[in-house]
Image: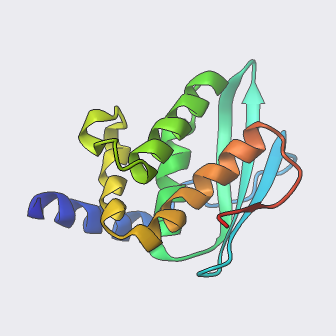
């Protein structure tokens, strides 16, 4: 367990310091804005699809280390996925972090599994899932702001 905790901390710090896909896509196919009012996280997710595949996904905004790290890892994981696979990954990630009956080791998350360490800190789960909910809204072309509340 200590090794997983150390890896969790290392990955969070790396993706927070060296954000991947942290930029605004000019003329995106879709866009969504997400807010976590409890801690002030605000994330914008930009999305380009081509023939039902996530061709490009990026984010910008401000948030805590968990929020921005999760967003960074999310963009890396979703590029090249079909819409169906992207939605399935969102569902798997969300359930792994929010469902007490789901054990993270039983969910096929690949490198994202390290983020399941946030489950030990229930108040921070919303930080880790904000970007994912915002991506899902962009995928569904939801026009309203997304909130974790």
Using the rendered image of the protein, determine whether residue 81 is visible from the camera's viewpoint: yes
Q: Residue furthest left?
A: 2
Q: Where residue 139 appears, x then y in whole percent?
A: 74, 38
Q: Quadrant of the N terminus?
A: bottom left
Which residue occupies 84% across, 41% down? 141
Q: Is residue 141 left or right of residue 96?
A: right
Which of the 4 quarters of the picture holds residue 57? top right
Q: How is the image coloured?
A: rainbow
From what the image shows, is residue 82 above or below residue 102? above
Which residue occupies 27% across, 68% down? 9
Q: Where residue 51 appears, x then y in whole percent?
A: 75, 18
Which residue occupies 34% across, 32% down? 108
Using the rendered image of the protein, determine whether residue 18 is visible from the camera's viewpoint: no
Q: Is residue 83 left or right of residue 50?
A: left
Q: Is residue 23 left or right of residue 4?
A: right
Q: Where residue 26 appears, x then y in whole percent?
A: 83, 51
From what the image shows, is residue 121 above or below residue 109? below
């Amino acid at each position: 367990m200590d090794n997983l905790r150390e890896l969790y901390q290392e990955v969070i710090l790396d993706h927070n310091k060296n954000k991947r896909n942290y930029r605004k896509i000019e003329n995106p196919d879709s866009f969504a804005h997400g807010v976590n009012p409890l801690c002030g996280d605000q994330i914008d997710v930009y999305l380009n699809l081509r023939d039902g595949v996530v061709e490009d996904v990026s984010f910008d905004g401000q948030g805590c280390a968990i929020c921005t790290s999760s967003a960074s890892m999310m963009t890396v994981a979703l590029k090249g996925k079909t819409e169906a696979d992207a939605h399935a990954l969102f569902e798997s990630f969300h359930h792994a972090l929010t469902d007490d009956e789901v054990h993270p080791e039983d969910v096929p998350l690949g490198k994202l599994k390290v983020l399941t360490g946030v489950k030990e800190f229930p108040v921070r789960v919303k930080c880790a899932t904000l970007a994912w909910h915002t991506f899902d809204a962009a995928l569904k072309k939801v026009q309203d702001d997304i909130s974790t509340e």
